[in-house]
Image (tube, helix red, strand yellow):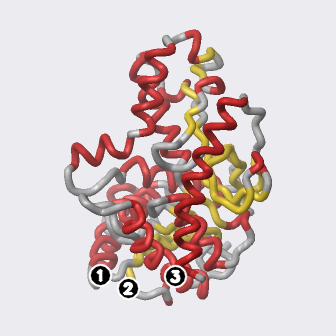
Amino acid sequence: MARKKITVIGGGNVGATCALRIADKELADVVLVDVVEGVPQGKGLDILQSGPVQGYDINVTGANDYKPTANSDIIIITAGFPRKPGMSRDDLLLANYEVVKSATEQATAVSPEAIIIVVTNPLDAMAQVAYMVSRFARNRVVGMAGVLDTARFRTFIAQELQVSVENVVAVVMGGHGDTMVPLVRLSNVAGIPLTELLSEEKLNALVTRTKNGGAEIGNFLKTGSAFYAPSAAAVEMAESILKDKKKVLPCAAYLDGEYDIKGLFVGVPVKLGANGIEKIYELKLSPDEIALLKKSADAVKELVDVIKTKMA
């Protein structure tokens, strides 16, 4: 049986940590690609040399071009610029549009059967770029957002209640940003509704903290942004696809009429298996929740419209 192969594009903190986590789980051989000479090669070699200690037989290599990535099963795109002080969202959008467009073109040219997981921000819009550029079927392009957002929400709930994070089930939908929609009504601890465990005031505070989860970490770090949890989330998605686990995870998926949203990537619960997105779950939402999801989709549409103007 041929070994599985994952291309990780971007040798920064998120990409390198993705490569390390993939190796630790012995999921697949990894090719780490970055435009900076020496960075992916050095980090790849360093991860490779952890193998004898950690006990994994995974081949990790670094490259500045896409030739070694040929016939990858999964392409994880983490490359891009972080948002710097003074940068508008549109500045970041257009800078990362160029990065994701180029990465998608080059990676899919040599791995036409791969499934793409997009991590670069602004997430939903970048997933749209990968989808438009690759021309892949919509089940083969998925954005990593909800897995991270629910991980944050679950962490805060578990800490507040002092229970195991493994018992906390949380649902977060919508775009990856301050318009995300944590669904308190559908979240629980071992089946016990959150509303029976926490006051409305406390729940609202946890929702707000979840929405600002990335910013909270960025404020601490001063330079740079979160990478341990984002890489863990991307690798959970990759594992569900490679092992055909069919996990139900909140991911950015291209909606074609689901939730009355058409032609946009928005975070919704999906089944992830060997074919990528194998099912999109349409939950019965309350009018308030529908309004919040629509508002979130509108925020994504604004960004996508900027990109479409650029591509025209």
Q: CA distance from mark 1 to mark 3?
A: 17 Å
Amino acid type for the residue under numbered disc 1: Val
- Discs 2/3, front: 2
Q: CA distance from mark 1 to mark 2?
A: 7 Å
**Which comes sooner in the sequence, label 1 or label 3?**
1
Q: Quadrant of residue 115?
A: bottom right
Q: Label 2, on which residue?
A: 64
Q: Quadrant of residue 250?
A: top right
Amino acid type for the residue under numbered disc 3: Thr
The disc placed on residue 148 is none
**Which comes sooner in the sequence, label 1 or label 2?**
1
Amino acid type for the residue under numbered disc 2: Asn
Crowding at label 2, few (<14), some or many (≥20) Cα neighbours within 10 Å?
some
Q: Label 1, on which residue?
A: 36
Rendered residue at 49%/79% (across/down): 103
Rendered residue at 50%/71% (across/down): 29
Q: Secondary structure at mark 1?
A: loop
Q: Is residue 230 left or right of residue 308?
A: left
